[in-house]
Amino acid sequence: MDERVAEWRQEGRIFVWRYPKRNKHAGEWHFTGNPAGCRSICDLIDRMAGGKVCHRTMRLGQVTPAISSVPNYGEPKSDRFTTIRIAFEPDAGELTMEEDGERLILTFGNKRLRSLLAAFAEVEVGIGDFGIATSDDRKEKGWWFWWMPWSAGHYEQ
C-alpha cells in the first residue's frame, strides 16, 4: 500500500443509508457527512488517486432521524452498517457498493474518482440533493448526496 494511503487517519463522520423501495430514488444509496468527515474521505480519495490497488476502512456514523429525514423519503431501512471499506481499483469503471455483514465495501477506479471526490466536497460545504452516476449505463442506479441537517445554525454532531 502507498505510504500516503497507509498514513491516512479518519476524522469526522460519514453516514450511509437506504430506504425501502417506495419511489424512484428510495432504494438507492444515500450519503452525507459532517464537514470534517467529508474532508477526510476527500483526503483519502486524493491519496489513492493515480496509485495502485489499495483500501482503507472508515467508521460510519449512526444515521439519525434528522439525517434520514432530509430527503423526505420516510423511514430508512433498518440497516446498521458500522464501517465502510473504501477500495481503489484503478481499472474499475463503475462505482459499486456491496454489503458484507455490518460492513459496506465501496469500490471505485480512476474513471469515477473525480465525481465521487466532487460529491463529498459539495456536501462538505452544505450542498445536497444531487446524484452521481455509478456507471455509463443510464439504467444503473445513481448514488444520492445530501446536506447535513442544521440545528440552531450548527451542523448536528
Image: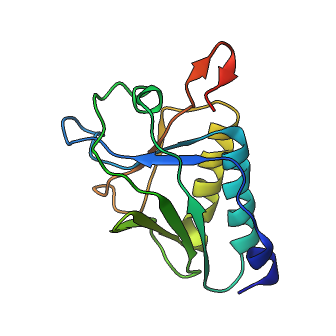
Q: Which residue appears at 30% of the width and 29% of the height? A: 73
Instruction: Give the residue at the far left of this rendering.
Output: 22
Residue 88 lies in quadrant: bottom right
Q: Which residue appears at 70% of the width and 39% of the height? A: 35
Q: Where does the image place residue 140, in percent across and percent down from the top left?
A: 31, 58
Residue 96 seen in render: no
Q: Where does the image place residue 31, in percent across and percent down from the top left?
A: 49, 45
Residue 97 lies in quadrant: bottom left
Q: Which residue appears at 65% of the width and 49% of the height? A: 118
Quadrant, the N terminus: bottom right
Q: Which residue appears at 33% of the width and 45% of the height? A: 18
Q: Is residue 126 left or right of residue 138?
A: right
Q: Is residue 117 left or right of residue 21?
A: right
Q: In the rendered image of this protein, does residue 154 appear above or below residue 148?
A: above
Residue 65 seen in render: yes
- Nearest the eye: 72 or 121: 72
- Nearest the eye: 70 or 129: 70
Q: Where does the image place residue 112, in percent across and percent down from the top left?
A: 55, 64
- Nearest the eye: 110 or 88: 88
Q: In the rendered image of this protein, does residue 94 appear above or below residue 69?
A: below
